[in-house]
Every structure is written in structure tokens, then in C-alpha cells.
Image (spheres, rainbow, N blue to C red):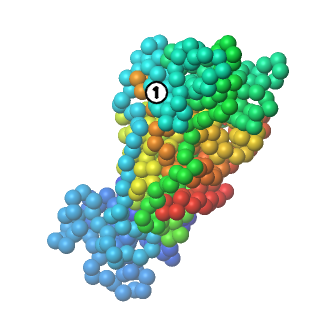
């Protein structure tokens, strides 16, 4: 098999127990005979070396390419052997390198809002009460400064005709016989009916409402004080003036999801082209790789799914995923959160992969976190969420507000509602916890989801929303319902400008 591509070289190196250094791989790939160059580099590598450095490869190739033998080729266990630098042999000389390698000095990455190891829920009814109370407390807190709201039981005591405001969770939405909208709002004290007249300017906003979301309304009480006529309606929302943070150097992150390794439709070639590209100088600024769920196809996720499995054992699927992850340059920081096809609990928030799966995916020190999680990279906060609720938002809302063709618009709705899964009881399963991890407390600079297998991005009140497509071609189910996935694309985010460019690998 020819070995001219970086991904193939990386596979070969890892099969021999070596880690892949991005620039070393690029150098090997551009040698006249990459397979022979790899052979020589491995043979002359210092004993116990875990990683082949660019320096070492350059010396190996240098001695060969022009016939001039290089007396400083590293090898053996001489005094100058970089092996002394604890574990990782052949350390790169900073500053002296050219090509695709980079300094890792200014990198920073922090993770917040991860349920992993914090889960307290026992699945009791009381836990559901707690999670909804916590959600209401936090979302009503976001709205409280904007309206002068009173509890529903206090509003019920007010004289007819008074001005009043209520903050509540939507427990019911109905259209009346006259075409108006009756919205029942629930707070910790009770419920109160609110009427939006069909001729009001904001009546079309009713289309955007989902059950269980938290809103505020202001209006006028009916003469008998039994109903509130709504004059204005407010979402927790993102301020229009929100100013996102940016990195203070030119650095990029690749935002992907839905790899689905183990499915017959997994696009291994497109993936390898992506990994190859990451080894090129053009991708030198890509220092982070975020994967928003569905690493593998899993087993027993959907009916008849087994007919399209390439790998039937879940652990083998993760092992194979991990092999593909190794094709990515070793100096890229990786963050992985689970999705609905992954082997963690389905109910959200989903904890990160357990010890056994972590050990399998222990590639390039990948960081494993829960779904959702907020990952702050060099000052830029990225809210990562797999996106199961997007199916619901798209099903419930009119086409122009949310659709599979514009998945980022469905994401805007989640930002507006400041909750990643506002509606309870449909596709989205909710794990009862003391605290609601799905509330968007802090406005993120970037919102990254996947799941719907469609690529789309855009800004909502200056927050960059990106749905990242997938690495799986159309499945039989998707064909039957006319879902045409965007497979084999990688959106690349500039962390210094928050601009996005899409790379195609199919
Ligand atoms: O789902 C990818 C997309 O396809 C997401 O929008 C759900 C939808 N999907 C895929 N298969 C099914 C079945 N069998 N039933 C309902 N919806 C489905 P993902 O879960 O990421 O594969
Ligand atoms: Fe998926
Ligand atoms: Zn999914």
C-alpha cells in the first residue's frame, strides 16, 4: 500500500508504537520514498522513543537526500540524547522548526458546566421537582431585571384593569375559537392564563414558543382579574450588544461532530483527507479539535440500525474511532463530548465517557467532558452541546424559524431561550438532577452543536452558532425521510476573529 499520505504514515507509525509529530509526518510524506524514509527514521530512532521528532526525521532525511552523511543523527544512548527529557524522546528544538509545527506555549483550555462525576440524581420524582425549580430560579433571574413581575397568586389578587407582569414556564399554549392565543404560565405559586390577541404585532412570536420554556409577559388584567391581556413578551435571550471575547493571536479550532465510526456509511476516506489536511502548513493554525458527540454509530440506537453496522461490537467501534483519531496530528488539543449514539446514559446532561471508554480513546491526551460543556479556549467560550433538542425545535417551529437546511437558526432559538433543551418530554430525555446543567447561564462566544447532520452557521446577537455536519453518508432511514446529510465538511473557526471557513473533504 502506498504511504504517501500523512494519515497512512501516522497509522503505520502508531502500529509500531510511535506517536505522530505533525511536522515529522509532513516531512516523511514529502520524502521521495515515504515508506523507505519512515523505515529509516524508525530504525535510527532512539531506544524508548515515544515520539519521532521533526528534528530526527530531518536528520535522517538530510543524510540521505543529498548523499551527505550527517554525523549528528540521533540514535543510541549517547550523552546528547534528548531521551533525558523524561519519557518523550527526541524533543523538538523550538524556533528552529519550519513547516506545520507550532509552539504550544500560549495555549489554554478550561472546561465548565460538566456533569461528569457530579451527578446527584436518583431518578426520584423529587429530583424532577428540583431540576425544574432550579431551571425556573435561574431563568427567571435572567428576566427579573427587565420586568416588574409578581408571583401568579399575587397577580390573582390584583384589582381588575391593573397593569401586571408575570414570569413563568409555559405549561400550555392553545388557540382560542377567535384565533387568539391562550398561554398558561406557571411559577412556583401556581398558574395564570395570559391572552395574546391575534392582531398584536408580536402575535407571530407565539410561533416560537415551546412548552416548558421560561418567558416574561407584561399586560393588563381583565376586569375580573381572571386573565392577563399581553402587551409585551420577553425571552431570557442574549443581549443585542453582547461583545464576544476573542483570542489574542491567530489560532483556529476545527469544530466537528457525528463521526459515526462503525456505521457502513462512515466516510473513512473523507476523514483521512481531513486528517491529512491537518498535517499541512495550510492547517498550521488549527490547534484545537472539538467533537460534539456521536463518535461512533453505537448499537441498538434506532430500529434496524444493526443492518447498517460495519462493526457490531461497541468497544471495537471505540477502538476504531481511536485509530482514526490518531491520524490527527499529535499536537492538536482534542475535546470530546458524547451524543445520543455514544455509550453513556441517553438522558441529558450526559456525563463524559467512563473509565473504560476513556482508556480506549486515550489519544493525544484528548479531554473528555459531558454533554453539554463549556470549553474556554484562549479566552473564547464555546458551548458544546450534541443537539438532540434541535429535532424538536425544528419539528415544532415554522420553517423560516428553524429547519434542517438552516440548523443554525434552530440554535438561535436555544440561545434566545437560554436553555439547550427547553421542551421536556419529547425526543429529549432529561435526567433529574439537583441543578439544571442545561440552562445557558453565561452567554457563550460560540455555540457548537451537531446531531442533525447538516452544516450551518451564523451569528445571533454576535454569538457564532455552528452546526457541524457529519462524517456519515446518508443512512437508509435518512433516505426514507429525505434527510440529505452534509457529510465530510469541517468548519474551521478563527479564534481571533470568530470567522468561520468551511473545508470540504468529499
Ligand atoms: O441523527 C441524525 C439525524 O437524523 C437527526 O436529525 C435525527 C435523525 N434520525 C436518524 N435516524 C433516525 C431514526 N431512526 N428515527 C428518528 N430520527 C432519526 P443521529 O441520531 O445523530 O444519527
Ligand atoms: Fe449523529
Ligand atoms: Zn446524534
According to the image, label 1 marks what residue? 137
Q: Residue at x 27, y 82 (%)?
A: 71
Q: Is mark 1 within 8 Å of ligand 3?
A: no
| Residue farthest toward the left in the current orientation of the protein | 79
**358 horizontally vs 396: left or right:** left
Q: Position of residue 47 (x, y in %)?
A: 26, 62
Q: Which quadrant, please, contains the N terminus?
A: bottom right
Q: How many marks?
A: 1
**204 horizontally vs 297: left or right:** right
Q: Position of residue 120 (x, y in %)?
A: 37, 23
Q: Position of residue 389 (x, y in %)?
A: 60, 33
Q: Residue at x 80, y 32 (%)?
A: 199
**239 horizontally vs 62: left or right:** right
Q: Position of residue 9 (x, y in %)?
A: 48, 62
Q: Residue at x 32, y 72 (%)?
A: 94
For residue 479, say whether it is visible: no
Image-quadrant location for residue 235:
top right
Looking at the image, is 205 positioned above or below residue 363?
A: above
Amino acid at each position: 500500500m502506498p504511504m504517501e499520505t500523512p494519515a497512512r504514515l501516522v497509522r503505520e507509525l502508531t502500529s509500531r508504537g510511535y506517536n505522530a509529530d505533525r511536522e515529522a509526518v509532513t516531512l516523511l510524506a514529502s520524502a521521495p520514498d515515504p515508506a523507505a524514509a519512515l523505515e529509516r527514521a524508525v530504525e535510527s530512532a532512539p531506544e524508548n522513543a515515544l515520539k519521532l521528532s521533526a528534528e530526527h526525521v530531518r536528520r535522517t532525511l538530510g543524510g540521505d537526500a543529498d548523499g551527505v552523511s550527517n554525523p549528528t543523527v540521533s540514535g543510541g544512548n549517547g550523552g546528547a540524547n534528548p531521551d533525558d527529557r523524561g519519557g518523550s524522546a527526541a524533543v523538538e528544538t523550538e524556533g528552529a522548526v519550519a513547516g506545520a509545527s507550532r509552539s504550544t506555549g500560549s495555549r489554554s483550555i478550561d472546561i465548565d458546566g460538566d456533569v461528569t462525576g457530579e451527578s446527584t440524581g436518583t431518578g426520584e420524582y423529587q429530583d424532577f421537582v428540583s431540576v425544574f425549580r432550579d431551571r425556573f430560579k435561574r431563568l427567571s433571574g435572567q428576566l427579573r431585571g427587565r420586568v416588574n413581575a409578581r408571583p401568579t397568586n399575587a397577580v390573582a389578587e390584583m384589582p381588575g384593569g391593573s397593569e401586571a407582569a408575570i414570569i413563568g414556564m409555559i405549561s400550555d399554549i392553545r388557540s382560542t375559537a377567535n384565533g387568539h392565543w391562550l398561554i398558561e404560565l406557571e411559577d412556583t405559586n401556581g398558574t395564570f392564563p395570559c391572552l395574546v390577541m391575534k392582531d398584536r404585532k408580536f402575535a407571530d412570536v407565539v410561533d416560537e414558543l415551546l412548552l416548558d420554556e421560561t418567558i416574561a409577559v407584561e399586560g393588563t388584567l381583565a376586569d375580573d382579574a381572571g386573565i392577563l391581556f399581553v402587551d409585551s413578551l420577553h425571552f431570557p435571550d442574549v443581549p443585542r450588544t453582547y461583545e464576544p471575547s476573542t483570542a489574542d493571536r491567530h489560532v483556529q479550532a476545527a469544530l466537528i461532530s457525528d463521526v459515526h465510526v462503525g456505521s457502513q456509511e462512515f466516510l473513512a476516506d473523507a476523514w483521512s483527507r481531513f486528517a491529512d489536511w491537518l498535517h499541512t502548513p495550510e492547517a498550521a493554525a488549527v490547534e484545537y479539535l472539538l467533537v460534539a458527540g456521536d463518535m461512533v454509530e453505537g448499537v441498538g440506537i434506532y430500529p434496524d440500525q444493526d443492518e447498517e453496522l460495519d462493526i457490531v461490537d461497541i468497544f471495537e467501534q471505540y477502538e476504531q474511532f481511536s485509530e482514526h483519531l490518531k491520524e490527527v496530528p499529535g499536537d492538536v488539543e482534542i475535546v470530546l463530548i458524547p451524543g445520543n449514539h455514544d455509550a453513556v446514559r441517553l438522558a441529558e446532561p450526559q456525563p463524559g465517557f467512563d473509565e473504560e471508554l476513556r482508556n480506549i480513546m486515550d489519544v493525544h491526551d484528548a479531554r473528555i467532558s459531558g454533554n453539554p460543556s463549556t470549553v474556554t479556549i484562549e479566552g473564547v467560550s464555546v458551548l458544546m452541546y450534541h443537539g438532540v433538542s434541535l429535532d424538536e425545535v425544528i419539528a415544532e417551529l415554522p420553517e423560516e424559524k428553524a429547519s434542517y437546511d438552516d440548523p443554525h437558526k434552530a440554535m438561535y432559538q436555544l440561545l434566545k431561550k437560554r436553555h439547550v433543551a427547553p421542551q421536556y418530554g419529547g425526543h429529549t430525555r432529561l435526567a433529574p438532577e439537583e441543578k439544571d446543567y442545561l440552562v445557558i447561564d453565561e452567554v457563550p462566544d460560540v455555540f457548537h452543536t451537531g446531531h442533525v447532520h447538516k452544516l450551518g452557521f451564523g451569528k445571533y446577537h454576535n454569538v457564532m452558532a455552528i452546526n457541524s455536519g457529519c462524517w456519515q453518508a446518508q443512512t437508509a432511514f435518512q433516505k426514507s425521510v429525505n434527510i440529505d446529510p452534509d457529510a465530510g465538511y469541517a468548519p474551521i473557526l478563527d479564534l481571533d476573529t470568530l470567522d468561520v471557513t468551511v473545508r470540504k473533504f468529499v
